[in-house]
Amino acid sequence: MSQQQDLEQDQEIVVSVADGVGRILLNRPKALNALTLDKIRVMDQTLRAWAEDDAVHCVVIEGAGDKAFCAGGDIRKLYDAGNAGDKAFLSAFFGEEYRLNRLIKMFPKPYVALMDGITMGGGVGVSVHGSHRVCSERTVFAMPETGIGMLPDVGGTYFLPRLPGATGMYLALTGARMRAADCLYTGVATHFVPHERHKEVLAALCEAERNATTHEDMQTAVTCVLDMFYEEPGAAPLAVQRDAVKRCFSGGSVEEILKNLQDEGGEWAENTLATLHTKSPTALRVAFRQMQVGAQLDFDRCMQIEYRLSQRLAGSPDFLEGVRAVIIDKDNAPQWNPSTLADVDPAGVDALFAPLPDGDLNLE
């Protein structure tokens, strides 16, 4: 093994530039490339530098290993910080992660996310806001936060309500997983390219970007390359269920959604209803309101609201219990408090969305 390979094995994120393409490799395969605060900081600094660097025409981000693009944030670290009441870490992690999400959304050059494998939580935040999102047959996309007493964040307040029909509400509340065809159907992904052709895509991008001079040239070159490799992934299950999703998840409250599912009947509705009954009642109410509010707000305002929620929920009993049940003890039997929707205080939910005493997150 070369000295360079040894170095890359030791780094949790590897950045490089060649032939006009800046490459970011999320390099924690044993941890499913989960985001750490250090990794967030490296990405932020790198992207800010590349935005001003004429030698970088395009950015490609990918995950190491065979399983994941990025399975989320470093939940164990957040759990420990929440347990310890370490507000400084929680503020730094979520604040810097959300600024990175915004940087990606506003990035002036093509940003290509190879969502090859598990793409969840924080991994969604460093992919879905990019200009080009490439899924493969290995893609598994989800926002599963209500299952650990948290909110579907990293920009979910903005992008989820803008998915077709009531799909965003469905994904936010249930944490349902989407494969490639559904990612394309919803617009979460822009292209489907089989995993085995990703190396060819990278080579073609390097070749295409060498002569790009303007931002328009860069965007066009990337789009043309990805269009050239694009394949059809097959029928999208969510497209088949679109009318049912809209009927059930357009309800005016979580209770109405549950009733709609009961009235709908059938295997999909019954399975969905059972899934919702496993989620944190508080998180369901928060996510429901998130989707309603987010549909009316611009991206920056959505991120500020997410920061308010993150600071209040990351140390909450349901988050600590959800992580214990799913990540620590893995018994998948969380004891939510309160345990029913009826016992969730509406005033308490309102308070979660209120401005923080120290002011809102500065996104600049």
Image (spheres, helix red, strand yellow):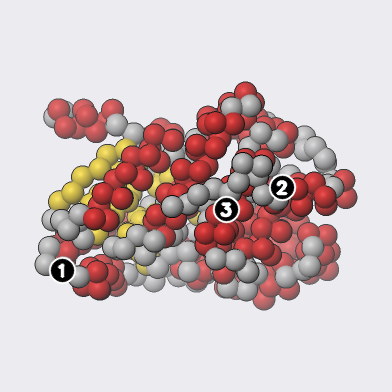
Residue appearing at x 74%, y 63% in the figure = 269
70 in relation to 132, above or below? above
Q: Residues within 10 Å of mark 2 (few under 14, many from 20)?
A: some
The residue that disc 2 covers is 352
Report how far apart the C-alphas of labels 2 and 3 lie in the structure: 12 Å
Numbered-mark total: 3
In terms of sequence position, does the residue under pointer 2 or pointer 3 come before the other? 3
Secondary structure found at label 1: loop
Q: Tell me which amino acid carries mark 3.
A: Gln
The residue that disc 3 covers is 304
Q: Residues within 10 Å of mark 1 (few under 14, many from 20)?
A: few
Please identify, in this view, whether the residue under mark 3 or under mark 1 is nearer the observer: 3
* In this picture, residue 137 sits left or right of residue 84: left
**Residue 133, horizontal then vertical, whole percent:** 38, 62
Q: Tell me which amino acid carries mark 1.
A: Thr
Residue appearing at x 66%, y 58% in the figure = 290
76 in relation to 355, above or below? above
User: Which sits in the foreground, 195 or 118?
Assistant: 118
**Residue 87, horizontal then vertical, whole percent:** 59, 31
The residue that disc 1 covers is 213
Question: Which picture quadrant has residue 63?
Answer: top left
**C-beta proximity under 8 Å, tags 2 and 3:** no
In terms of sequence position, does the residue under pointer 1 or pointer 2 come before the other? 1
**Residue 328, horizontal then vertical, whole percent:** 60, 27
User: Which sits in the foreground, 161 or 133?
Assistant: 161
Report how far apart the C-alphas of labels 1 and 2 lie in the structure: 47 Å
Q: Tell me which amino acid carries mark 2.
A: Leu
**C-beta proximity under 8 Å, tags 3 and 1:** no
- Could one spot residue 345 in this view of the protein? yes
**Residue 241, horizontal then vertical, whole percent:** 63, 71
User: Which sits in the foreground, 141 or 154?
Assistant: 154
